[in-house]
Image (cartoon, grey):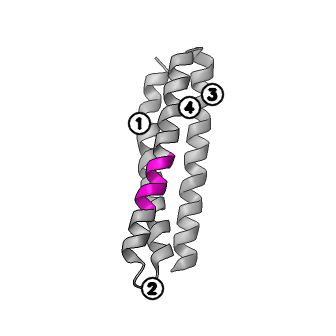
Amino acid sequence: MSICVRNRTNDATSELSKVEGEIRRSIDQSGSKELARQFQASSEAFQSYLHSQCLYQETLASPGNGASDIRRACEAALVSNRTQQLVASRSWLNK
């Protein structure tokens, strides 16, 4: 299971990076420094939340086997959700 979870997390992280890059390019084209600042703050807050929440999940599972898989599964789920939210918000950038 470890390899599968690791691959899922890596794929989700790569997709998030791709979408974030597309959004940054759109924001740069818009010329809005405030939007760029807000997006950066949002990205940093998400990374902090991701780390804290998934570490918490790993700690909860630490008495048993697979705690690191629990953390990776948490990361994959949260990163996928973030990516979906960003994709949904892209239409606002094209207006």
CA–CA distance in space, label 3 to label 1:
16 Å
Q: Where is mark 2, residue-wise?
A: 65
Residue at the (44%, 46%) spot, across then down:
82
Q: Which residues are magenta?
A: 47-54
Mark with earlier residue (4, 2) = 4
Amino acid beneath label 4? Ile
Q: Nearer the viewer, mark 2 or mark 1?
A: 2
Categorize mark 4 by other alpha carbons within 10 Å: few (<14), some (14-19), many (20+).
some
The image shows residue 21 at horizontal and vertical percentages of 62, 36
Whether residue 16 is visible: yes
Amino acid beneath label 1? Ala
Q: Where is mark 3, residue-wise?
A: 25
Discs 4, 2 touching: Cβ within 8 Å = no
Prevailing secondary structure class for the magenta stretch in the rendered image: helix
Residue at the (46%, 77%) spot, across then down:
67
Secondary element under disc 4, as helix, strand or loop, is helix
Q: Where is mark 4, residue-wise?
A: 23
CA–CA distance in space, label 2 to label 3:
42 Å
CA–CA distance in space, label 4 to label 2:
39 Å
Q: Nearer the viewer, mark 4 or mark 1?
A: 4
Q: Is residue 61 above or below residue 34?
A: below
Drawn side of residue 24 relative to residue 61, left or right? right
